[in-house]
Structure formats: C-alpha cells, structure tokens
Image (spheres, coloured by chain):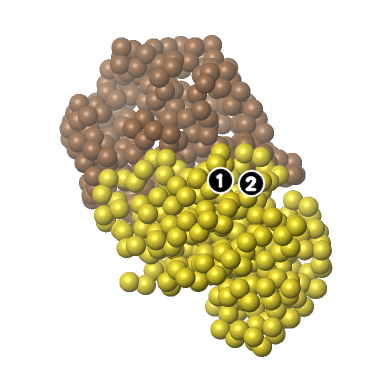
Chain colours: A yellow, B brown
Amino acid sequence: MTPDVLISEVGPRDGLQSVAATMSTEHKKRWLTALHAAGLREIEVASFVPAKLLPQMADAAEVVAFARTLPGLTVMALVPNVRGAEAALEAGAHKLTIPLSASAAHSLANVRKTREEMVEEVRRIVELRDATAPGVQVEANISTAFGCTLQGEVAEDDVLRLAAAAIEAGADESGLSDTTGMANPAQVRRLFRRMFAEVGDRTGAAHLHNTRGLGLANCLAAHDVGVRTFDSSLGGLGGCPYAPGASGNVVTEDLVFMFEAMGVRTGVNLEKLIAARTPLAEGLPGEPLYGMTPEAGLPKGFAREVAHG
Amino acid sequence: MTPDVLISEVGPRDGLQSVAATMSTEHKKRWLTALHAAGLREIEVASFVPAKLLPQMADAAEVVAFARTLPGLTVMALVPNVRGAEAALEAGAHKLTIPLSASAAHSLANVRKTREEMVEEVRRIVELRDATAPGVQVEANISTAFGCTLQGEVAEDDVLRLAAAAIEAGADESGLSDTTGMANPAQVRRLFRRMFAEVGDRTGAAHLHNTRGLGLANCLAAHDVGVRTFDSSLGGLGGCPYAPGASGNVVTEDLVFMFEAMGVRTGVNLEKLIAARTPLAEGLPGEPLYGMTPEAGLPKGFAREVAHG
C-alpha cells in the first residue's frame, strides 16, 4: 500500500543541530536504523556546513554513506551553498534541501546572502547536480515564510516570488517553513493555496513548528489544501533556541498518530516509531523529548488496526 | 466587538475535580476573578455532586454565588441528576450542563444510569428549570462521543440519537465531548456535521482533549464545520487520570492564541489569561500546568495587535 502522505523526518539534521550536545556517529547510526525500521522513507540526515560552525554535523559524509545502506530510504541533506552541495553529492545524498529566507533580515543572518544571491546559489547547485548527479532531487525550502522574529511580518508576495524564482532557477520543488513558530492555520491554508496556484505540483513540504502548540493544527490545515509532505522531528527535537522551554518542530509521533487516526496512511508503524525514541534518548542524555502520544500510549487496539510498517 | 467564538473555561470544574488536591474556596475566588478579568464570559465553576464523592466540589454553592458577582459572566455548573440541578438552581447557576454518555458502559460507570434513564433525567431537570428558573439554560453534553476506553468504538448513530433525544427532552443545546482523548479531526468534522444536520443550531460546545496532542487540530476541525463554542481549561488542567503524564483538556491559552492568530476573535486578552495561571498555580501547589504559548511567550507585537480584553 502506498502511503497517502510522506512524513519527512528532520530530527537527525534540524533536531541535532539545534542542541548543544553532539551525538556520536554510532548513536546516529542506531537512531537512523530505528527510524527506518519504523517505516520512515525520507530522512534529513545531515547538514553540509563547515564543521567549525556546526560540530554536530562534522560526520555528515559518514552519516550519509551509512543512511544509503538502509533500503528504500531517500537520504536528504541540507546544503546552504554550492560548496555544501558538492560535499553532499560526493557523499551520495539522494536529495538536497536548500534554505531560502523570505525575510531579508533572516537571509543575511542565516546564510550571509541576500535572497537574490540565494536564488543564484540554487541555480548553481542545480547546474552542479545536472552535471554530476542528475538523479538527485533539489528542494528549495522557503524559511520564515510565515513570519520572522528579526523582521516581523513577511509579505506573502515575497514568499511566492521567492518560491517561483527558486523553481525557475531549477529547483524540483519548493516547500514552506515556519522557522520561528509564528504560523496559524488560516495563514497556512492561504499561503499553501497560493503556492499551488503559483508553482503547482512543485509545491513541496510543510515544515511547521510547535512553538505555541499549533503544530498539528497547522499540519491539518496544510493537508486540507493539498500538501502531502510533512517535515517533523522525533520527540519534537529542534526549533527555536530563543523560545526557551518551547518545543521546536512538529512531533513526528503525534503527527503520525493524527494522520493514522484520520485514516490517512503514513506507512509508519507507531509502536516502532515510539521505540525509536530510545536510541535518540541514549544518544543525547538529558535532552528533553516532547510528544503526547508516547506519554499517553496508543489507544487499545489502535496499533493492530492501522499498523502498516 | 462581539467575539466570533465563545471560549467556555472548564478548569474550575473539570480541572479541579480531576486532581487529587482540593483548592481552597479563597483560591477558587481569586482564580475566577483572574479568568473573568482576562475576558472569559462563560466558566464552568463547579459540579453539584455529593461532597463525599468529590470533596473538591464541597463549596460549589459558595463558588457559584461568588461567580455571580462577576459582571457579564455566565456561571455554569455540572449536574448529573435532578438533585444536583436543584442545588445548582438554588445556588443561582445561569447554565446547567448534564453529562450523557454515548457509551453504554461509560454511562453505567459514570452516573450509574443507562443512557435512556439519563434522557429521562434531562426531562425532569428541564421540568424543574421551567417551574423554578425559566431563564436558566440547560446543556446536554454527550460524553465519550468519539470513543470510549471501556467499550471501545462508539457508534456515531448512538451519539446522534442520544443528542436528538436530549433535545427532544427539552435541553437547549447538546455538545460533544471527547472524554477519553480519542477524537481525530476527520471524525470531529464528520460527527459535528451530522450534529448540525440532526439538531441544527442546538448544536453546543466542542469539548476536546489533548491526550495525544490533537486538541487544537480537533478544535480547528470543529470550527471548520461551524462549531462556535469551545470548552478548554487553563493550563490544560483535567482530563484522563488513566493516561499518566498526558495533559487533559485543550489548553485555553493555546486555543485562544490559535484563534486570535487566525483573526477569529475570542474576546480574551492573552496576557491577562496567562497571568491567570498564577492564582491557579498558587491554589494547587506542585500541580503540573500545560501550555506551549505561556512557555514560548507571545510573538512580539502580538498582544498589541489582537488584544480586546
């Protein structure tokens, strides 16, 4: 059975790069194995940035090589520039994701480039991909699409223009990220509807945060208007270091529970997914994990009814 | 400005009766004052049940009398039977809510009556109301409407039949409760759509839980199909004692944040609402409070934009 939605797990990249501790390569491998065993078929496993900026990602090439051994897995890597893309392609990533900020202020703060320069970076990465690894997918993810703590409001037209420019520059798809946890369901529906109108089936993932508890409601809103790929993070790892105590990304466990309970197939086995918290917790001792479903447990008979993994 | 939705705060009843500690009457008054100051205009303040069963509610009459002094507040009380209704009406409650279980097993466990007997109880309470306090509203709330941990699945037809019977017996409105935290957004939409088809504008509140993190998504789903009254609890107090660690009711703070962010006016001032956690925490020392919005804080400029309270 083909799943109805694609759950794209971002914890090993987004989650790990937002915590102070560094998970050992061995623990990463165990965690990836458990995520794959639960049925996840797309995982953002690493970020190709200078190790001096993000020591948590110093083993990116080794992690990608290992992830490639997991059958049927799309191995994703974040690359902020051509240099990162070269390294990710050399390591064998199946899919590259490039962050483009819709907020001018955040773009400079995050990647030290203007939005226009980032579109050119997308173009160069696509050229590199075409020349060296034509089967690799390139996703341009529009960050701060729903608001920016540096700049405040972000014009929807800016988001749409940037997504269209990224597609024009050759990206295969463009998703929208609620980087700062400011999205609400009305806005999610409006903006993704405009995305479908603007770039059609090149509309990529909804990357939504749970900063103020709206993560699942925003995912529901995105699903309502046709989004079928959802980024989330096991244990809600990741997110906003400037919102202390607030969990970051949408919690994969709760997201899978919501969809499966609705009859929307994810291809993920919830019991095995919850079991994948163990290698995560062991690899990051003391790090708080979020998730209501693991706390409450599955309703009686639930796993039997809906498990596909 | 008239609010677009009515947030019906149930913490002082649903929340307090689900914790082991008993909040003092003085603390209850302080907490109610703070909730009212935040702009809440309907609060379920007490349950009229024998004090030996629920010592937390022994001061129900005094709490109702106090709540009546708060201007513009609809003072709600839960009554499981005629005897409770007599006491609540004598105390001066403006609105009575009667729990009717859609699950046969839960009905016997909760109120020691069959579902049919509870419909007759509604009829007798309505007769009492008509004879002694004709201005008082009577709500019949269908509990376990989305599933039951005792009985398992609950037939939607049973829910609809029971709601229609309660309205026929004279209840002014009938809401649906996800007593055991099993609802999902698809089901919420389906069942409330059927409610509107069956009992029209007598469809009452959505009383949804956050047991597995779906609380806000379920509220959004209910709002999508026309529900305009939402039960919730400050700090998420209340819920399922048999789901350890799981928060219970939808968190009022996060619910108000979601609606206000969407442009749906609640009439509630979020900063004052968050301040109302202080008397709650002081009245129940050591009790864990939930809520992502209070943890993360409001986005910069948010309160200024949307505050009406």
Q: Amino acid at mark 2?
A: Ala
Q: Nearer the viewer, residue B46 or A55?
A: A55
Q: Chain of mark 2?
A: A
Please name the residue shown 59% across and 26% down the image. Answer: B277
**Percent x, y for residue B210?**
44, 41
- In this rendering, position of residue A196 left or right of residue A110: left
**Percent x, y for residue A261?**
36, 55
Please name the residue shown 65% across and 30% down the image. Answer: B272
Proximity of marks 2 and 1: CB atoms separated by less than 8 Å? yes
Q: Would you place residue B58 above or below residue B180 in this image?
A: above
The quarter in which the N terminus of chain A is drawn is bottom left
- Residue B228 visible in the displayed image: no
Residue B136: quarter of image: top left
- In this rendering, position of residue A47 left or right of residue B250: right
Q: Amino acid at mark 1?
A: Leu
Task: Say the numbered circle drawn on residue A61.
Answer: none
**Percent x, y for residue B85?**
32, 21
**Percent x, y for residue A207?**
58, 60
Label 1: element kind:
loop
Q: Chain of mark 1?
A: A
Tell me which numbered mark, 2 or 1, is placed earlier along the sequence.
Answer: 2
Q: Would you place residue A215 above or below residue B32 in this image?
A: below
The quarter in which the C terminus of chain A is drawn is bottom left
Label 2: element kind:
loop
- In this rendering, position of residue A180 left or right of residue B245: right
Task: Say the numbered circle drawn on residue A284.
Answer: 1
Q: Nearer the viewer, residue A161 or A248?
A: A248
Q: Would you place residue A192 above or below residue A296 in this image?
A: below
Please name the residue shown 49% across and 34% down the image. Answer: B236
Q: Nearer the viewer, residue A307 or B285?
A: A307
- Residue A33 visible in the displayed image: yes
What residue sits right under mark 2 in the picture?
Answer: A21
